[in-house]
Image: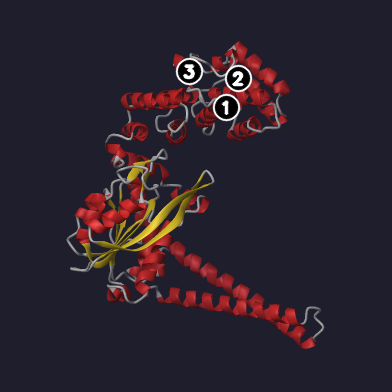
């Protein structure tokens, strides 16, 4: 791994002491001590840094000096990182010290949280014209953990889009070497995808490989809803349900009878953990009698509380000094009733939550229609099946082959929430959807938006590893395969590093025969 210490023009802050730690360690893994792989020059540098660095940095560096990398934990790294990137602290010593510690921590097995990714990210931030971050990431994947998703993401989202040619070329060289050298199929699929991002060529530039999708989402299954919904503001399944529900509620749409009687067949493409299934269950089942009563009680009690509070506001406007005896008595009575309402609302909410914990069966009657789904990730399929939202077991298969299994004109609604961002070329999906939908059936889906004219194909593989489609590309496919675009809506799909990811919702209806 000499390439890490032989950069043609090392960044000025990376002194010989710092570079000494970027060379292979004499011992890898195990119970590392302060002496393992740390040169005398490196230790001298760390001690000197501790003397002049900020207090938070000095504490961690002295701990490192005494206990070695094995004594450093995730919160220590965070303290170092925050201090190293703070403009009002001695920047250079803190930053280089952090790099030294992170490199040494990455030799541990297991290493502290994201030691490699943090180090590579800091190298990229401090030395944007150098390929050291790429080389360090490559070494980590080859020698430590070929399935480190955070490091793979860093290679594609940071180094692959660097404005410096040397860094981009190093990323492509690393991707090709990793593709040839890694043993696991999942890791090779990530390398192949990274190569496609950098070259915009090959099959992965048109559609993600099945192995890549399986790898990504098997790794996310356990934290998918917590991360995407709770932390990143993901609301696409609910937003898609709203536009489909509004379409049928208008009463003039085709299939109103099937909608009213809950006899529809709904297909969920790329079901993930079953969020769409839980939303769209309302179209194939009636709510249980108990659930309906509780929701009505919740609505009525909430409205009653709101009216009482409004009355108090109106009395305060007429009698701001509370001098009117009648008003005061009315205020007190309203206050007592409001407290009772709040107690009742708490009870109702607890009962509803208890039902939700019991699952779909406690909330809904037996289905009259069908709710079907597919996903390439076995772990996602398992999570979706556990929701009870689907009337048949979710299938582990790609979207196009799943659609091919349906007879013509047997499906009423096809939903795809954030699935097309891993497909790219949507022609086959539109073709099969047009074949299996009944006339008047709808296709509801989301895309990540690509600017018009950015790519001649109408879609593009992005550094994020996802695909974006241009609205004109989607509308062109809709026209070609006999769909009318009923609704298109710009949305924020999710947050990513505090940045809004822009997208669109589409509702397309399969035209009746002979309809222009």
- Give the farthest residue toward the bottom: 326
Q: Quadrant of the N terminus?
A: top left
Q: Is residue 203 visible?
A: yes
Asked whether the beta carbons under mark 1 and mark 2 sit within 8 Å of each other, the answer is yes
Identity of the residue drawn at 31% across and 33% down: 185
271, above or below 7, in the image: below
- Distance from disc 1 to disc 3, alpha carbons, whole Å, reads 16 Å
460, above or below 240, in the image: above
Element under disc 1: helix
- Distance from disc 1 to disc 2, alpha carbons, whole Å, reads 9 Å
Residue count near mark 1 (Cα–Cα under 10 Å), binned few <14, some 14–19, many ≥20 = some
253, above or below 147, in the image: below
Asked whether the beta carbons under mark 1 and mark 3 sit within 8 Å of each other, the answer is no
Report which residue position mark 1 lands on: 126
Q: Is residue 260 left or right of residue 8?
A: left
Q: Is residue 46 left or right of residue 134?
A: right
Q: Is residue 475 left or right of residue 137?
A: left
Residue 4 is tagged as: 3
Identity of the residue drawn at 19% across and 64% down: 409
Element under disc 2: loop
Q: Residue 477 lies in what quarter of the image? A: bottom left
- Distance from disc 3 to disc 2, alpha carbons, whole Å, reads 15 Å
Identity of the residue drawn at 57% across and 16% down: 38
Task: Pinpoint residue 217: horizontal percent, then vertical percent.
Answer: 38, 44
Task: Pinpoint residue 142: horizontal percent, then vertical percent.
Answer: 40, 24
160, above or below 419, in the image: above
Report which residue position mark 2 lands on: 13
Which callout, 3 or 2, points at the residue further toward the start of the chain? 3
Which label sits in the foreground, 1 or 3? Answer: 1
């Amino acid at each position: 791994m000499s390439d890490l210490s032989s950069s043609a023009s090392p960044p000025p802050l990376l002194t010989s002491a710092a570079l000494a730690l970027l060379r292979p360690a004499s011992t890898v893994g195990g119970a590392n001590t302060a002496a393992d792989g740390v040169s005398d020059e490196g230790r001298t540098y760390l001690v000197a840094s501790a003397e002049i660095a900020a207090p938070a940095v000095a504490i961690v560096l002295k701990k490192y000096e005494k206990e070695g990398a094995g004594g450093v934990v995730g919160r220590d790294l965070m303290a170092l990182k925050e201090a190293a990137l703070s403009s009002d602290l001695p920047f250079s010593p803190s930053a280089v010290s952090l790099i030294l510690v992170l490199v040494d921590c990455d030799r541990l097995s297991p290493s502290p949280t994201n030691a490699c990714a943090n180090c590579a990210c800091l190298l990229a931030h401090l030395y944007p014209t150098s390929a050291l971050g790429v080389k360090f990431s490559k070494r980590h994947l080859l020698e430590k953990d070929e399935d480190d998703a955070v490091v793979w993401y860093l290679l594609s989202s940071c180094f692959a889009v660097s404005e410096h040619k040397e860094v981009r070329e190093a990323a492509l060289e690393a991707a090709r070497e990793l593709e040839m050298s890694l043993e696991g199929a999942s890791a090779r699929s990530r390398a192949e995808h990274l190569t496609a991002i950098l070259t915009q060529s090959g099959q992965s530039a048109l559609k993600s490989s099945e192995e890549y999708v399986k790898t990504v989402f098997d790794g996310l299954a356990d934290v998918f809803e917590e991360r995407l919904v709770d932390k990143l503001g993901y609301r696409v399944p609910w937003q898609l349900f709203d536009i489909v529900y509004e379409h049928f509620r208008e009463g003039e749409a085709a299939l109103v009878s099937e909608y009213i009687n809950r006899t529809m067949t709904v297909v969920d493409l790329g079901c993930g953990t079953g969020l769409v299934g839980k939303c769209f269950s309302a179209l194939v089942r009636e709510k249980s009698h108990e659930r309906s009563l509780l929701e009505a009680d919740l609505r009525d009690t909430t409205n009653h509380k709101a009216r009482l509070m409004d009355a108090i506001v109106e009395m305060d406007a007429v009698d701001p000094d509370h001098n009117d005896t009648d008003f005061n008595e009315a205020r007190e009575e309203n206050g007592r009733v409001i407290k009772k309402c709040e107690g009742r609302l708490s009870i109702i909410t607890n009962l509803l939550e208890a039902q939700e914990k019991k699952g779909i069966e406690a909330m809904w009657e037996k289905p009259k229609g069908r709710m079907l789904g597919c996903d390439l990730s076995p772990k996602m399929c398992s999570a979706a099946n556990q929701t009870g939202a689907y009337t048949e077991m979710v299938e582990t298969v790609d979207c196009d082959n799943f659609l091919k299994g349906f007879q013509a004109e047997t499906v009423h609604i096809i939903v795809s929430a954030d699935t097309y961002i891993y497909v790219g070329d949507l022609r086959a999906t539109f073709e099969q959807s047009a074949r299996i939908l009944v006339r008047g059936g709808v296709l509801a889906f989301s895309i990540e938006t690509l600017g018009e004219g950015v790519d001649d194909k109408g879609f593009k593989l992005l550094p994020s590893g996802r695909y974006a489609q241009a609205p004109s590309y989607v509308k062109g496919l809709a026209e070609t395969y006999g769909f009318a675009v009923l609704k298109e809506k710009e949305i924020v799909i999710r947050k990513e590093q505090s940045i809004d990811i822009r997208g669109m919702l589409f509702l397309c209806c399969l035209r009746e025969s002979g309809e222009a």
